[in-house]
Image (spheres, grey):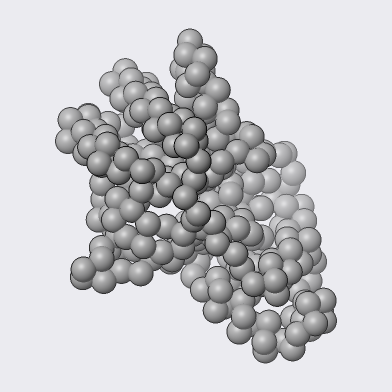
Amino acid sequence: MRLDNYADLGRHPVQLSLYLNRSESFRDIFHAHQGIEILYVHRGNGRVMIGQELFEMKPGTLLFFKPFQLHTIRMTITEQQPYIRSMLLFDPAVLLRYTEPYPSLNSFLLHIWKHPFGDQWVDVTDTDAMDKLFHFYKDESQVSRNAPVQSEKVLLDTLSLLHRIQNLFDKQSAVGRVGSSLRFSPSVTAILAWIEANYASEFRLTDLARHVHLTPNHVSYLFHRETGSTLTNYLTAKRLQQASFLLKTTNLSVREIGHRIGFSNFSYFCQLFKKHNGLSPAKYRTS
């Protein structure tokens, strides 16, 4: 796995990828965007890990990822079971000012953006309506992945699509959710909590193993079995996700950020960040 969190929302604050078959190009990666990601599953089955929570993915699953929220998706893809999804990725600060005349839509945007306990997944029961919705915008809309946000057509289509998603979300919220929430084992839950509290310190597998009362080998085995990731890859993803957040939201120097997330070697931090994001930390900050 690798962290892949770069999307140029500075130049293209709204990016859509509608009713796309990802069966051949799908990669099981940790990623986190600086914007909000809304993802809907048309076809396919799998699991998504959001922070330290685990959810089932199936046709009708609607997911909301907050800015800089680390997540990874694992799909079971076969010839008979492709993975087809729609995705809307956008800078919420840009769209927020355009939703101000519409209180309900404005409230929905703030809810999925900033509410600490906001719902992040919905099992949509009316999947036919959802499929038609995304088909309409794919076939009829002129919104393109790299269209300038200043375009009136882009803004109107994006706000309209967001409004329709809100309506489906509100309807489903009123009737409740079908049980798609899954659970890690108590041991993996404890491992994730330990990493969350200690990712900025020097990592020693023996310390983690001692904390969860398991052998180092068993810790590594359990973590990989349940998350699909090695401990090293997950720890790297967590550190770089935090680096991206600090680069965009603080004035700390790049060197200080590297130190704060657990990299004592500044050059190695810069090399690793560029390898996983395609940009140096300094260029990422200004992008």
Which of 232/40 is in front?
Answer: 40
Direction from residue 41 to residue 198 in the image, left or right: right
Which of 278/24 is in front?
Answer: 24
**Eyeballing the image, is 139 above or below 195?**
above
Direction from residue 192 to residue 286 in the image, left or right: left
Direction from residue 73 to residue 164 in the image, left or right: left
Can the viewer see residue 262 in this picture?
no
**Eyeballing the image, is 96 above or below 143?**
above
User: Which residue corresponds to the image point at 39% horizontal and 39% vertical from the top-left?
Assistant: 88
- Give the image location of residue 147, x and y in percent: 31, 32
User: Which residue corresponds to the image point at 73% horizontal and 47% vertical from the top-left?
Assistant: 253
Furthest-top residue in this view = 101
Q: Quadrant of residue 16?
A: top left
Furthest-left residue in this view = 139
Total labels: the figure holds 0
Q: Quadrant of residue 231?
A: bottom right
User: Which residue corresponds to the image point at 31% horizontal and 25% vertical from the top-left?
Assistant: 157
Can the viewer see residue 231 in this picture?
yes
User: Which residue corresponds to the image point at 78% horizontal and 77% vertical from the top-left?
Assistant: 212
- Give the image location of residue 249, x and y in percent: 67, 38
Furthest-front residue in this view = 175
- Give the image location of residue 158, x and y in percent: 35, 27
Which of 137/128 is in front?
Answer: 128
**Eyeballing the image, is 239 above or below 62?**
below
- Give the image location of residue 282, x and y in percent: 60, 48
